[in-house]
Image (cartoon, rainbow, N blue to C red):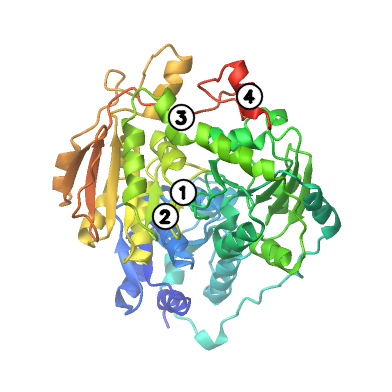
């Protein structure tokens, strides 16, 4: 069997039905083998970055690992942004890059390059992958494929890369003699419940923080929260994991979180932080203002995240969230929640929820009105992919996620141009779901090549463009800190936007324009792809937001001292 045929058979055995890539000389054998497969579809993505991110979307929606391929040199380097995003986003993706023939490869020679388009991609991506290897012996191909996929899916998930020289991909192999990878399974995590149970028993004002690590434990999470009637907040990456119509849901915390959620943290005496890094975008840079009088039960699958942290007052549990919640189900936990805690939280949510925030402080309400309308029209089970910038925060602050909805965004690397290719990957993984792909005009323009895939394959992706003809998140910084010098972010500063209507026509997609001040989405978009151009005007802001030197509960626009003191006071 030819090695490239074997790789395709390996993917087939693992249930992979779609591979994203851009063909090039060093992967022609692999693409040809994919073309002969009856069960694995090869999707030519028109740019390698699109392939690398579409594979992320496929992994997230399918529950399997994603696969993206590219040729050597520029093909491989064009995938690096997606590889890094998968690494910081804990997404299992197998990246396969072509490489020059082994007899052309420079190895340790003190020269820059020997073969045409030769690039040492393994050295480049090692800091942003869980495993990367040059397979220069065909007898090791099976072993390395099995090892890479095991590593990608074990523990804290993430991307892996196999660099495949052309003469290896075309070589003949004896399948029966191939060496296999045998995983070394570690024993289960041991932990001491004494301190944990005591902290829970003593708590009067507990709260659960849902992080991205809860993604594969949503059922266990819902059962745990409802069993003990626990108040809940989410991180940006935890949004959509829990049904946000839950009565005791407070919102998203963090630098761009909901004010009611951030205010509540100031009075929490026990935070059960599940699958979250508790990074500074959640806690604020002023660490002493984050839960000044409370303890944290910090559960994370990555022990390094637990140990390398500035917050000290934590009970650290190095384990998978699903395992933790299963263990808690076996225990007879004793919560002693003060009934006044529920009353205070309800009042805080009533006074400082996002809709009230917009009504009170935001002059240009158009972007928030669009998000409020999206929140109304989307139904259970729908997917929302969200790009980077103001559009991301408007969506995260405003959209109330219903049961089994998905909110997919990038909170680690956070590359503009993320939403479109990830939406494409998710649509390929599950063509029956409605996908709403939210973008700013900047990120939309960065990822235009993805539009051709939506048109070509009739993907069920509704592309929502929040069009303020500017790079709004940066203009907000420029207004606050740079005396309104809008360099590179507005038309006057050198940022131009082409006609979205003409772009839609060029890509053969239906185009709709929506007035952000009176948003009414078209009624005939169910089950098909289109572009919805939401005109929201200039001078857009994200509200509330945190200043660098302020504690997390004291966000812009600042409340006066009396109101802030009253808002924080338990009664």
- Discs 3/1, front: 3
- Count residues near mark 1 (Cα–Cα under 10 Å), then give few for <14, some for 14-19, many for 20+: some
Answer above or below: position of 257 versus 406. above
The foreground one among 370 and 448 is: 370
Residue 108 seen in the current view:
no
Q: Nearer the viewer, mark 4 or mark 3?
A: 4
- What residue is shown at x 49% (from left), y 28% (from top)? 544
Is tag 1's residue or tag 4's residue first in the polypeptide sequence? 1
The residue indicated by pointer 1 is 80
Label 2 secondary element? helix
First of labels 1, 2 by sequence position: 2
C-alpha span from label 2 to label 4: 49 Å
Reply above or below: 61 against 289: below
Of the two numbered discs 3 and 1 on the same chain, state the one appearing first in sequence: 1
Pick the quarter of the image with the C terminus: top right
Question: Which labelled disc corresponds to residue 47?
Answer: none
Disc 4 to disc 3: CB gap under 8 Å: no
Mark 3 lies on residue:
357
Q: Quadrant of the N terminus?
A: bottom left
Q: Estimate how packed mark 4 is, as few (under 14), some (14 to 19) or many (20 or more) residues with alpha carbons within 10 Å.
A: few
Q: Which residue was labeled with disc 2?
A: 52
Inter-mark Cα distance, 3 to 1: 39 Å
């Amino acid at each position: 069997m030819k090695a490239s045929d074997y790789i395709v058979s390996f993917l087939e055995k693992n249930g992979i039905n779609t591979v994203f890539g851009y063909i090039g000389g060093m992967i022609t054998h692999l693409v040809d083998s994919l073309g002969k497969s009856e069960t694995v579809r090869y999707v030519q993505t028109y740019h390698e970055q699109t392939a690398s991110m579409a594979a992320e979307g496929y992994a997230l929606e399918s529950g399997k690992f994603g696969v993206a391929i590219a040729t050597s040199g520029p093909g491989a380097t064009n995938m690096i942004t997606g590889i890094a995003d998968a690494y910081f986003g804990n997404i299992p993706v197998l990246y396969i890059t072509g490489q020059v023939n082994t007899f052309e490869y420079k190895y340790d020679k003190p020269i820059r390059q020997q073969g045409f388009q030769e690039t040492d991609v393994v050295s480049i991506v090692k800091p942003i992958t869980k495993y990367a290897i040059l397979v220069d012996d065909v007898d090791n191909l099976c072993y390395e494929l099995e090892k890479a996929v095991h590593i990608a899916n074990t523990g804290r998930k993430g991307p892996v890369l196999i660099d495949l020289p052309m003469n290896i991909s075309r070589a003949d192999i004896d399948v029966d003699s191939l060496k296999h990878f045998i995983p070394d399974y570690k024993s289960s995590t041991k932990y001491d419940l004494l301190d944990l149970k005591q902290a829970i028993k003593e708590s009067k004002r507990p709260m659960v923080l849902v992080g991205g690590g809860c993604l594969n434990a949503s059922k266990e999470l819902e059962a745990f929260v409802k069993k003990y009637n626990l108040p809940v907040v989410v991180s940006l990456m935890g949004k959509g994991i829990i049904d946000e119509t839950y009565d005791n849901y407070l919102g998203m915390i963090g630098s761009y979180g909901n004010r009611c959620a951030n205010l509540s943290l100031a009075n929490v005496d026990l935070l059960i932080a599940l699958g979250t890094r508790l990074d500074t975008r959640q806690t604020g840079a002023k660490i002493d203002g984050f839960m000044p009088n409370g303890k944290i039960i910090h559960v994370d699958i990555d022990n390094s995240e637990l140990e390398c942290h500035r917050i000290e007052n934590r009970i650290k549990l190095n384990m998978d969230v699903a395992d933790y919640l299963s263990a808690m189900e076996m225990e007879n936990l004793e919560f002693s929640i003060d009934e006044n805690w529920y009353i205070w939280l309800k009042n805080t949510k009533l006074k400082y929820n996002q809709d009230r925030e917009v009504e009170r402080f935001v002059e240009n309400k158009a972007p928030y009105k669009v998000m409020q309308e999206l929140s109304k029209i989307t139904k259970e089970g729908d997917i929302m992919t969200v790009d980077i910038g103001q559009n991301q925060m408007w969506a995260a602050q405003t959209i109330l996620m219903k049961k089994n909805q998905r909110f997919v965004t990038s909170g680690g690397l956070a590359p503009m141009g993320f939403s479109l290719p990830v939406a494409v990957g998710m649509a390929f993984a599950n063509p029956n779901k409605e996908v709403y792909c939210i973008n700013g005009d900047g990120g939309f323009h960065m990822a235009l090549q993805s539009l051709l895939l939506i048109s070509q394959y009739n993907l069920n992706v509704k592309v929502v463009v929040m069009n303020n003809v500017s790079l709004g998140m940066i203009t907000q910084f420029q207004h606050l800190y740079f005396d309104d010098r809008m360099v590179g972010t507005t038309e006057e500063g050198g940022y131009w936007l082409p006609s979205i209507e003409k772009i839609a026509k060029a890509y053969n997609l239906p185009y709709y324009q929506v007035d952000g001040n009176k948003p009414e989405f078209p009624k005939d978009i169910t089950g098909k792809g289109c572009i919805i151009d939401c005109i929201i005007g200039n001078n857009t802001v994200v509200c509330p937001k945190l200043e660098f030197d302020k504690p997390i509960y004291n966000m812009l626009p600042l409340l006066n001292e009396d109101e802030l003191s009253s808002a924080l006071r338990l009664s």
